Image: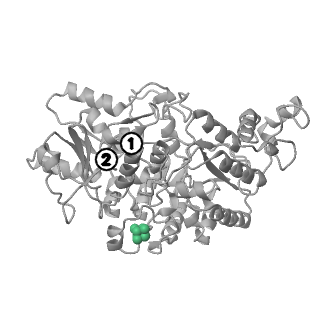
Amino acid sequence: NKLTAQKKVRSEDQYSPGGHTNMRPNRASIVYGNLCRQAFSGVAVILGRNKASLRRIAHYDYWSDSIRRSVLLDSKADMLIFGMGERPVWELADRLAGGETLEDLRNVRGTAHVLRKGQWEHIEPSRFIRDRKPVFLPGYDEIKESKEQFSQMSGAFQKETNPGNGRPLIQPHGHEAVYLNPPAEPLTTEIMDGLYDLPFTRYPHPSYDAGIPAYETVKHSIVTMRGCFGGCSFCSITEHEGRVIQSRSEESVLREIRALRRMDDFAGVISDVGGPTANMYQMKCKDERIEKACRRLSCIHPGICENLITDHAPLVQLLGKVREAKGVKKAFIASGVRYDLAERSEEFVEVLAEHHTGGQLSVAPEHVDEDVLDKMKKPGAESYERFAEMFDCASKKTGKDQHLVPYYISGHPGSTTHSMIELALYLKKRGLRPRQVQDFIPTPMSMATSMYVTELDPFTQEPVYVAKSLREKRLQKALLQYWDIAQHDLAREALIKARRGDLIGSTDRHLVPPASGKGALSIHEKRRRQRPQDQPRGRLGRRAATTGGRRRK
Ligand code: SF4
């Protein structure tokens, strides 16, 4: 959150009062873990939440461009809870209250602990798997030295993320090792409802003296589910929330609307009804036994699994009840919509267009190049086109002038200057001018990060092209902003390097005008183009303005 993809300090911290920066230390889990250890000698320190969860094994750190040890070792904590954490917290609390010690609690799902020298060579068999054997991941020292070992570690880790069949993992770090139990079981609807019925105040802590930007985005939103079976390479939601969708009941969501109505500043507008993916509500594998045995990393790539129930009826029904709830004037869907699923339900797309879109709907096709999309584990561009067509028709039916805001990623592993040129030409042909282009950031533990570090596919070990230098990443991003005169110098540089000087010129078939001479922009034209109201519109995503706070999918 502190630095951009270009490693520059952000001007605002979304999670701090007043958006002020530098209010939290770098690597806060490590700093706070060590401070707790100093301040409360003899008290067990247990680390948790996403910062710790996504650094539970040795991982790549983009900001320092280095491989770091598991955060459990550097924080000096006694235990680490990974995933959303409710089940392990309950089990730990119950067993501690029952008189067990931390030493006894080494077999709790969703937790990790440290094994000292001599312990991990003769490890106790696991109670969670039939042959009781854990998987040894390549050690920290090995992955630091060898890209192949890092890549194999990533692939092996990913294969053990299904709580139904995941094995415990052991990763040596010198004389010590980190032991990870299998992930916690997903929550049932009943438990999810119980969680959301807890008496949250829905306000930031009163000690904060200024507004928190991220809170403003979510304060009037409702989470209907958690988890994601998409398995996009660049995303770590699955590693944290799990692959199985865990949904709340309609009654629970309606109870939360009643709580929203009690908020001072709620004026009847729900900013988002969703979750990691808005339209995965209540979707699941057709058979729990198949789901428990499944070793696939995505239920929808490559292609939607025939065992996946993609029925949108529960969501359509829920949305209907939300709209009818007392005190609700409007309920938006701002969470990402998986268009390859949505295109299976005309009814959902119509409801979405008629009732839940505020003029613009964010979707994330991410790219058009088949190879890059395959590395991202995203559906092909034709799926996005079909969805765009459906959304356009549904919007016209309701007489609304609304459009899609497509999001794209530059610099993703597999993405070359040539594939970015292909994407830029695709955008230009359709009159699309993406204002928000995400320059790829390698976040800890994602599959894309493994590709970024090793330039290898973590499952096939085949080479993957990676734009590593910050300059090349900037050039890739500039191509997608071909319409922005501030990016023209970089875009021209990218085109010349790729030997595509034929795309520099002033006609429709060109991407950017020349810097000088015939066809170059006049001062007057440059000024005119800087005015946003002069940007032309296109069918698939017209006047793609910044939407702020929308989640990508
Ligand atoms: S069998 Fe198919 S639907 Fe079921 S969990 Fe595996 S990939 Fe998902």
Beta carbon of the mark 2 residue lies under 8 A of ligand 1: no
Q: Quadrant of ligand 1?
A: bottom left
CA–CA distance in space, label 2 to label 1: 10 Å
Judge by depth and name the residue closer to the eye, 483 or 302. 302
Quarter of the image where the C terminus is located = bottom right
Q: Please tell me which residue is depicted at 16% across the width and 33% down the height of the picture.
A: 43
Q: Please tell me which residue is depicted at 63% across the width and 67% down the height of the picture.
A: 350
Q: Name the kind of residue labelled 2 in the image.
A: Pro
Vertical side of 420 occupied by 323: above or below: below
Q: Name the kind of residue labelled 1 in the image.
A: Ser
Q: Are marks 2 and 1 in contact (CB under 8 Å)?
A: yes
Q: Please tell me which residue is depicted at 38% across the width and 51% down the height of the picture.
A: 152
Vertical side of 335 occupied by 395: above or below: below
- Circle nearer the N terminus (2, 1): 2
Element on which disc 1 rests: loop
Q: Please tell me which residue is depicted at 56% across the width and 52% down the height of the picture.
A: 334
Q: Nearer the viewer, mark 2 or mark 1?
A: 1
Residue 46 occupies quadrant: top left
Question: Which dot marks residue 138?
Answer: 2
Residue 296 screen position, x and y as percent: 41, 64
Residue indicated by mark 1: 146
